[in-house]
Amino acid sequence: MRPSLNSFERAASAAIYQTCLVIDVSVSMSFDDWKPSRLAGAMEAALALLDAKCRQFPRDQIAVVSFAHDACLELGLTEVTTGAHGIHHAIQRLAVRPSTNIPSGLNMAAQVLAPAVNGHDVGTWGGLKRFIRELFEPAPAAAKTGRHVLLLTDGFNCLEVAVDSVASAQRLKNEGVEIDVIGIGGTHSQVNEDELRRVASLDSQGRPRYRYIGDKSTLIQEFVRIANRIEELPA
C-alpha cells in the first residue's frame, strides 16, 4: 500500500478536524473472542487515535458518543492536546448496555458536529466563553474545519421498531460530514455489511469507506491511519 492525501477534503495539514467517535457498547461488545473483549479492543484503538492526533494534529478535536439501545454523549468536542486527559477518561469509562441502535449514535453525532457560531460549540461552557472572548478580540485567520464521524459496531440494529441507519448517515453527509465505518467481531456475517457500506462516505476512488476488521492489532492500525488522515491505495 502507498500513502496519499486522504479524501477528507482539507486544503492544509494545519486545518482543524473534528472527529466524533461513535462506538457500539451493546452486550456483544463484551464477547471475549478479542482478548479481553471487543470493547476493550475498541477502547485501546480509540486511545491510539488520540495519541496519534496529539502528535500530528494537536489542534484537532474529538468527541465521544456511545450507543446501545440509545446514544449517550460521553464527551463533547474537545481539543486533543489541552483536553487529552478528559478524552482519555471518556474512552476508558465506556461500558456495555443492552441492544443496538446505530441511528441513535449517528443522530447524536449530528448534534455534536452541528455548525457552531464562529466555529465554537456554544452549547458548552468552554465554547461559550471562547465565543464571548472572541467578540472583543481580533480574530486570527479562520482555519478550515473538517467534520468527521468514525463509527464502530459489531452487529445489526436490534430494536422492536424499524430504524434507518442509512437515512441518519445521509443527513450527516448532506451537511458535509465525512463518515468512516468499521465493523468488528467474529465473522463478516455477524455484521450488516451491506448497510454499513451505505452508511459510509466514499473515498477518492468511489469506494465506501467501510472496513471489516477481525483482530485488535489491525483495528489499532486502522484508527491510527484515520487519525493521521492517510488513505491507503492499492500499490
Image: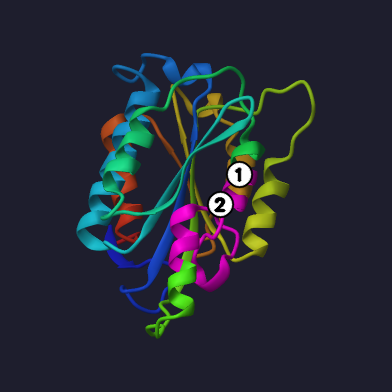
Q: In this figure, what is the number of numbered marks?
A: 2
Label 1 belongs to which residue?
A: 108
Which range of residues does the magenta coloring cover?
107-130
Residue drawn at (43%, 72%) of the image: 133
Q: Nearer the viewer, residue 207 or 147?
A: 147
Q: Is residue 53 above or below residue 181?
A: below
Given contact means CB atoms under 8 Å apart, are the residues at marks 2 and 1 in contact?
yes
Three-letter code, disc 2: Val
Image quadrant occupied by the N terminus: bottom left
Where residue 210 appears, as percent x and y from the top left, is: 50, 47
Where residue 58 appears, as percent x and y from the top left, is: 26, 61
| Residue 77 magenta | no
Question: In what element is the residue under mark 1?
Answer: helix
Mark sitting on residue 112: 2
Q: Residues within 10 Å of mark 2 (few under 14, many from 20)?
A: many
Residue drawn at (58%, 26%) of the image: 68
79 on left or right of 19: left
